Image (cartoon, grey):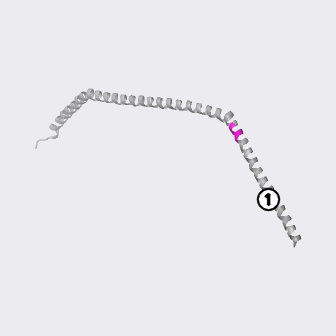
């Protein structure tokens, strides 16, 4: 049994050594991953400063220009819309004035023509009446 214990102890020692080596490898992988993470983050920050920041500045400048143009277009559109509305009101007012002036000036002429028509109708009816009435 002593020999079996020696073999068991040897195997247990080997397993303990392997476990320690596994732990050291895991710690080494963790440290390596942390170092790689820091390097990658430093690289990303460098890229961001060299590439992304100037691009963002240009994009922001373009957006400011677009905002200015949009504001100008909006103001001009409102101004043109107001001018069109004012012109339409003026045209409506002018049309109303022309209509009322034409009615006022033509109403006398229309009245005169109607009067002449009624007078002619009356004369024609009077001329036709004596002929249509025959004595009994």
In the depicted view, which residue is nearer to us: 100 or 72?
72
Q: Percent from the top left, x then y, of residue 15?
A: 82, 62
Q: Residues within 10 Å of mark 1 (few under 14, many from 20)?
A: few
Tell whether position 42 is magenta: yes
Which residue is pictured at 34% across the width and 27% down the height? 94
Tell whether position 120 is magenta: no
As drawn, is 119 to the left or to the right of 9? left
**For the N terminus, which image quadrant?**
bottom right
In which image quadrant can residue 49 be found? top right
**For the C terminus, which image quadrant?**
top left
Q: Percent from the top left, x then y, of residue 33?
A: 74, 48
In which image quadrant can residue 84 be found? top left
Q: Main secondary structure of the magenta part?
A: helix
Which residue is pictured at 27% across the width and 28% down the height? 106
Task: Reply above or below: 100 against 16.
Answer: above
Question: Residue beneath label 1, please?
Answer: 19
Residue stretch rendered in magenta on the structure:
41-45
Which residue is pictured at 69% across the width and 39% down the height? 44
Residue found at the very far right of the displayed protein = 3
In the depicted view, which residue is nearer to us: 37 or 97?
37
């Amino acid at each position: 049994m002593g020999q079996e214990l020696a073999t068991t102890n040897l195997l247990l020692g080997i397993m303990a050594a392997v476990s320690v080596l596994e732990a050291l490898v895991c710690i080494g992988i963790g440290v390596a991953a942390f170092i790689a993470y820091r390097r990658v983050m430093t690289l990303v920050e460098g890229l961001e400063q060299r590439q992304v920041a100037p691009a963002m500045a240009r994009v922001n400048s373009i957006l400011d220009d677009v905002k200015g143009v949009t504001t100008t277009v909006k103001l001009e559109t409102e101004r043109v819309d107001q001018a069109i509305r004012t012109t339409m009101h003026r045209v409506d007012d002018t049309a109303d004035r022309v209509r009322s002036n034409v009615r006022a000036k033509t109403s006398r002429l229309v009245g005169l023509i109607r009067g002449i028509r009624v007078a002619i109708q009356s004369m024609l009816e009077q001329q036709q009446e004596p002929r249509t009435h025959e004595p009994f």
